[in-house]
Amino acid sequence: MLLFFVLIIISSVMSNAQKINTDFLPKLMATKPEQFKELMDNADKYRLQILYTQIDRDKKNRPKFITFGYRINNSEYFYPASTVKFPASVLALEKINNLNIKGLTKKAVMLTGAEYERHTPVTKDSTSENGLPSVAHYIKKILMVSDNDAFNRLYEFIGQEDFNETLRKKGYENTRIFHRLQVGMNKEQNRRTNPIKFMQGNEIVYQQPMVISEKNYSSVTPISVGKGYVQGDSVVNKPFDFTDRNFYPLLDQQAVLKSILFPEAVGPKKRFNLTEDDYQFMYKYMSQMPTESTRPSYNPIEFYPTYCKFLMYGSGKNEVVNPNMRIFNKVGDAYGFLLDNAYIVDFEKGVEFMLTTVLLCNNDQIFNDDKYDYDTIGFPFMKNLGQLIYNYELNRPRKYKADLSRFKMVYDK
């Protein structure tokens, strides 16, 4: 009987933890009609979804979460673009730890071969300190500037099937990540991942052959969006097919982010096998501005301080950076879909919150025409939403001020 009541209590706690308040965000956005009314009135057209999580600390600094949602729907498709690079970074670190081979670390030299059509090898990386590629250096490039090739190399190391099955075992059952980015490979090519070997000096510490995924991760139901798409020089007047494209729903995105930021606050099943050094490595490069990076070194005109910090700053190259704020995030933009999955911290004010959002910026509903409404609709929305929530957080009472020292990083410069 005691066990029965314990199970009932656990079930009740889990049920409460999964509840999402859907009333708050519409009311808060309604206070700024000049910024949000058009989007809210046409939310279906924009496929707008928002997930906002408040964080309160107890006297021992343990976090408690309250989540608010707007149009959260795991079955409404959006293209996740570069947000898939975040779980790739995490899974690559976890795979290294699970293999537990002497000399195999995130900084070990990673040499990628080529064995199947469209495979490309990598044996050098001029942007790294030693001129050679590694998992650590790929993750740096992913987190700071969203490098596509870096993601593809981690995808190849993890393997298509292991990528998806590992996430599913951790409870992320709606996520499908099964193709490389920006290289135009077909399904068969994406099923096969390049051979890889890791080196310490002249010694091979781990070797992985080409791996072939045996499963089909395409959507079981067709996914069509819009009213047309450009193919060659012509417009095809039928919806664009996303059936064979990645999908990474907002609930999963924020849950993965939460598991990395607050591993002690999620169940063992959802945690990743990372070391404390891995966590600190991730925090550093999630929040480091490209202008603070030494290796790689980035052109500050192209990669300005607020680059890839859509929430709070939009796309503004001339935005003034709040010196007390850091944004730990991963963004995405492709096919008119604009996304940001962020943990935003103001160390001086003791403010912290998670905010994850997506919207489709494609008023003409034509895909592949490079005529998307990022600048007129998407980025202003991102900036306005981040600032709306931040200003609300500034005035929200807290019983205990958060100790955020875990997230204070020493940056490259």
Image: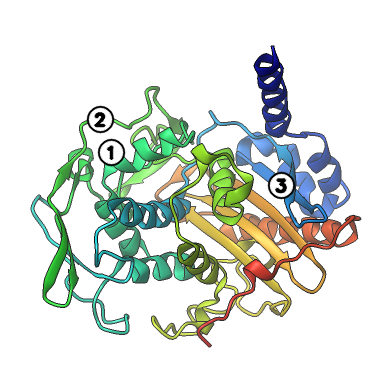
Q: Nearer the viewer, residue 388 or 37?
A: 388
- Residue 265 drawn at (x, y percent): 64, 46
Q: Which residue is mark 2?
A: 215
Circles 2 and 1: CB distance less than 8 Å?
yes
Location of residue 105 in the rendering, given as x and y in whole percent from the top left corner? 31, 66
Residue 100 or residue 223, whichever sits in front: 100
Residue drawn at (70%, 34%), measured in percent from left and top?
17
Q: Is residue 92 left or right of residue 285?
A: left
Residue type indicated by callout 3: Tyr
Q: Does 265 appear above or below 144?
A: above
Using the rendered view, name the quadrant where residue 110 is placed.
bottom left
Q: Which residue is mark 3?
A: 52
Using the image, determine if residue 289 lies above or below residue 20. below
Q: Is residue 11 left or right of residue 361?
A: right
Mark 1 residue crowding within 10 angstroms, few (<14) / some (14–19) / many (20+):
some
- The numbered mark, 2 or 3, whose residue comes first in the sequence reads 3
Task: Residue 363: tell me if it is visible.
Answer: no
